[in-house]
Amino acid sequence: MLEFHRVDVSPEAAALLRALTAQHGPLMFHQSGGCCDGSAPMCYPVGMFLTGPGDVLLGDLDVGVEESVPVYMSASQFEYWKYTHLTIDVVDGRGSGFSVESPTGKRFLTRSRMLDQSELEHFALA
């Protein structure tokens, strides 16, 4: 049986998330919608960034730690992105001062692709 996900994580990002979890405890992402941080996925210790009814849970990333890493996006932004699959990745560079990877010399970024036909059907978008 096929498993469908709206969001995944690259092996390199998963490795960084394991190291950051060891340092900060359980983590979560909120996909930034612009302004100061562009469209960067912002990584926070759980409880540092409060989500609410205006946020959509895209999925949980299994990165090999006890607790999965949830990924959220604002509902208004989701309306633009609902036809895409997102992958949290990491590259060299300085990210936002608010995201926990900032001091590591790495930054998280989101790679996207359009959902394929079977994904569109699964998510009732076809």
Image: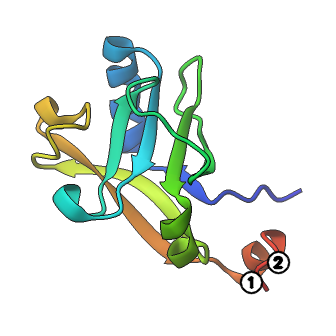
Question: Residue at position x 39%, y 65% from top?
Answer: 111
Report the quarter where the C terminus lies: bottom right
Which mark, by number, is residue 117? 1
Which mark, by number, is residue 21? none
Other-residue count near label 1 (Cα within 10 Å), few / some / many at <14 / 14–19 / ≥20: few
Q: Amino acid at mark 1?
A: Gln
Q: Quadrant of residue 99?
A: top left
Q: Amino acid at mark 2?
A: Glu
Q: Nearer the viewer, mark 2 or mark 1?
A: 2
Q: Quadrant of residue 39?
A: bottom left
Depth check, front residue: 114 or 70 = 70
The secondary element bearing badge 2 is classed as helix
Q: Quadrant of residue 75?
A: bottom right
Task: Report x, y in % for residue 11.
Answer: 43, 43
Other-residue count near label 2 (Cα within 10 Å), few / some / many at <14 / 14–19 / ≥20: few
From mark 2 to mark 1, how far is it between C-alphas?
6 Å
Task: Report x, y in % for residue 58.
Answer: 61, 53
Coloration of the structure image: rainbow
Q: Are marks 2 and 1 in contact (CB under 8 Å)?
A: yes
In this rendering, would 35 be left or right of 44?
left
Q: According to the image, label 2 marks what residue?
A: 121
Report the residue that reaches farthest toward the right: 1
Question: Residue at position x 16%, y 36% from top?
Answer: 102
Report the quarter where the N terminus lies: bottom right
Task: Report x, y in % for residue 41.
Answer: 35, 51
Image vertical order of residue 30 relative to residue 63, above or below:
below
Question: Residue at position x 34%, y 16% from top?
Answer: 24
Image vertical order of residue 97 relative to residue 57, above or below:
above
Total number of numbered discs in the rendering:
2
Task: Report x, y in % for residue 67.
Answer: 59, 22
The secondary element bearing badge 1 is classed as helix
Question: Residue at position x 63%, y 47% from top?
Answer: 59
